[in-house]
Amino acid sequence: MKRRDFITLLGNAAVAWPLGARAQQPDRLVRIGLLMMYAESDVKGQAFAAAFREGLHKLGWTEGHNVRLEYRWATSEMETIQRFAAELVALQPDLILSSSAPTTAALVQKTRVIPIIFGNLIDPVGSGFVASLAQPGGNITGFVNFGASMGGKWLDLLKQVAPHVTRAAALFDPEAAPYIEPYVDQFKAAAPSLGVEATAAPVRDLSELDAAIAAQAREPNGGLIVMPDGFMFAHGAQVTSLAARYRLPAVYFFHSFAELGGLLSYGNDIVDNYRRAATYADRILKGEKPSDLPVQLPVKFELVINLKTAKALGLKVPEALSGAAAQVIE
C-alpha cells in the first residue's frame, strides 16, 4: 500500500472510530453534563449526583482521570433551567444526565444528537420524551419512578395511618407534572371504597401552596397526598412545614419529606435510580445508543414513617405498618 493511501485510510478510520474507543484513550477526558433541578446546596440533589459519581467510579470512570463532570444546578426556575440546558449543550459533552421532566424537556428542545439519560421521571412516554419504554428511540433513555397505580396506594396508606380522614386533596404543580392526570385519576378511583372525598389541588407557586393547604384544613378530617413533581420536591421543607402548621396528616412520595417532618412517605429509592443510571452512561460511552437501551423501571421501594409527627397529630401508627417500614423516625 502506498504511504499516501495508508494515511488516507488511517484518517478515515479515526473519523469512524466509535465513541467508546475514543472515550478510553488516556489523553482524552470524557465530558458528562449534569442538569439538576435543585440548588447546589440541596441535600437531595447532592445525594443523587453522588450516587451517579459512585456508580461511574465502580465502572472505571474517575473524575479528573478519564471523565470530567459539568454540573449545572438550575433550581426549579424555568428560565434558569433553559439557560443552563443551552450552556451544557453548547459544551458538546459526550452525554448529559437530567434530573426531572422540566430539565429533560429543556434538553430535548436543544439537542436531538447528544445522548441524554434521565434519572428520575414519572411518565417519559406521556411526556413525549420516548416512543416506548422498551424502544425509546432517539437520543434519550433512562429510569422512571413509579406507575399511576401509586395514586391509590398513597391514599390507602393515608387511611391506614389516619383512619379518621374523610377528605383528601392531591397537591401537584401542573407545569412541573404534565403527566399527573393518571395518578390523580387512580387517587380518585380509590377514594369511594376508602370512604374518602378526593379532590385535586393544583398549585403553581408557594402562595398557592399555602392557600391550598389552608383550604384543606378549614373543615375537619382532612388529609393530603403530595404528588410527585419537581416543584414539590424542591419545596419539601415548605410543604411539610405547612402540613404541620395546619395539622394535616399527609403522605409523600420520597423519604426526604418524612425526614423533614412529614408523616409518611412511600416510593422508590430515587438514589438507587441515579446509581443505576451510571451503568447506562458506561454503556453509551462504550458505544451503545440510547435508542437501544430500554427505559428501566424502579426495583427498590421504601416506606418511611415519622413517629414524632404521628404523635404530634395524635395518631397511633398500626404495628403492621411500622413493621413494614424501611425506616421509622422517632
Image: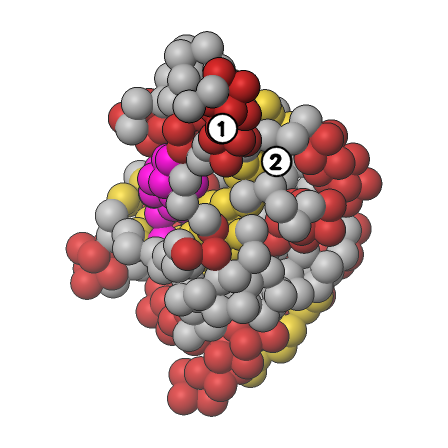
- Which mark's residue is nearer the viewer, 2 or 1? 1
Instruction: Determine the main secondary structure of the stretch shown in magenta.
Output: helix
Q: Residue at x 59, y 23 (%)?
A: 70
Q: Amino acid at mark 1?
A: Leu
What label sits on residue 9 in the rendered view? 1
Above-or-below relation of 5 to 240: above
Residue 13 located left or right of residue 213: left
Can residue 260 be seen here? The reply is: yes
Quarter of image, res 60:
top left
Range of magenta residues: 268-286
In percent of width and height, residue 213 lies at: 66, 59
Above-or-below relation of 317 to 328: below
Q: Quadrant of the C terminus?
A: top left
Q: Tell me if mark 2 has few (under 14), some (14-19) or many (20+) residues whose alpha carbon lies within 10 angstroms of its own.
A: many
Q: Nearer the viewer, residue 24 or 229?
A: 24
Q: Amino acid at mark 2?
A: Leu
